[in-house]
Amino acid sequence: MKVFLLKVCQLIFFYYICIVDSSQPLKKIGLSRQNSKVNFNKMINKVIEESIKIGIPIKCEYVPNRGFVYEVDGFYKSETVSIEEENNVLIATARYNEKTEINTTKDIVELNYKWWEYSKDRYDGWKYPSEKWKDLFDMYGLNCT
């Protein structure tokens, strides 16, 4: 599943630069018509790629005039957090327009932990983190018992 999501993000990007942005000749955007092999690993942000590899549930969408928007599910009261690249920095935006700079995969896990801590006493369904997030909390030494 993780590899599938990564490939979907990469294909969306490839689709955009090769088909949607047809105003740019392929050579100008770094592709040749004779050899259209592309190194997809260079197209996705390394923090996002690593996050997908360790199991963080990330969806990717291309939004015109904004670029790639990554949606991370499972943030309890906030539900989802969107992550966008602004001036070469990843910024996570949660409920109430709360912004957090993301430099590592651990930053995403810690942000989820913060939302779980905030939400766990507000609804019985949030009392315990989901199994997926609990495993990630454990990986980074965040106590959720």
Image (spheres, grey):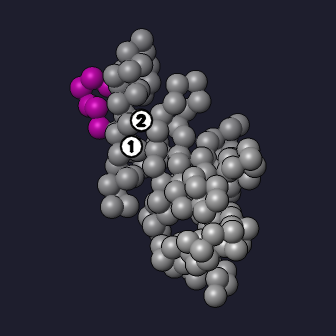
Question: What stretch of residues is rendered in magenta?
Answer: 32-37
Mark 2, residue position: 13
Residue 110 visible, this orientation? no
In the rendered picture of this protein, how many numbered marks are placed on residues?
Answer: 2
Q: CA distance from mark 1 to mark 2?
A: 5 Å
Mark 1, residue position: 10
Residue under the point 35% across and 25% down: 18
Give percent across and percent down for residue 138: 58, 82
Q: Nearer the viewer, residue 119 or 86?
A: 119
Amino acid identity at mark 1: Gln
Give percent across and percent down for residue 35: 26, 31
Instruction: Name above or below for residue 25 compared with residue 37.
Output: above
Q: Are marks 1 and 2 in contact (CB under 8 Å)?
A: yes
Residue under the point 38% across and 37% down: 12
Q: Nearer the viewer, residue 24 or 103?
A: 103
Instruction: Name above or below for residue 30 compared with residue 8.
Output: above
How crowded pointer 1 is (Cα within 10 Å; few <14, some 14-19, many 20+) is rated as many
Amino acid identity at mark 2: Phe
In the picture, residue 129 is in which quadrant?
Answer: bottom right
Magenta-colored stretch includes residue 35:
yes
Residue under the point 74% across and 47% down: 96
Residue under the point 68% across and 50% down: 94
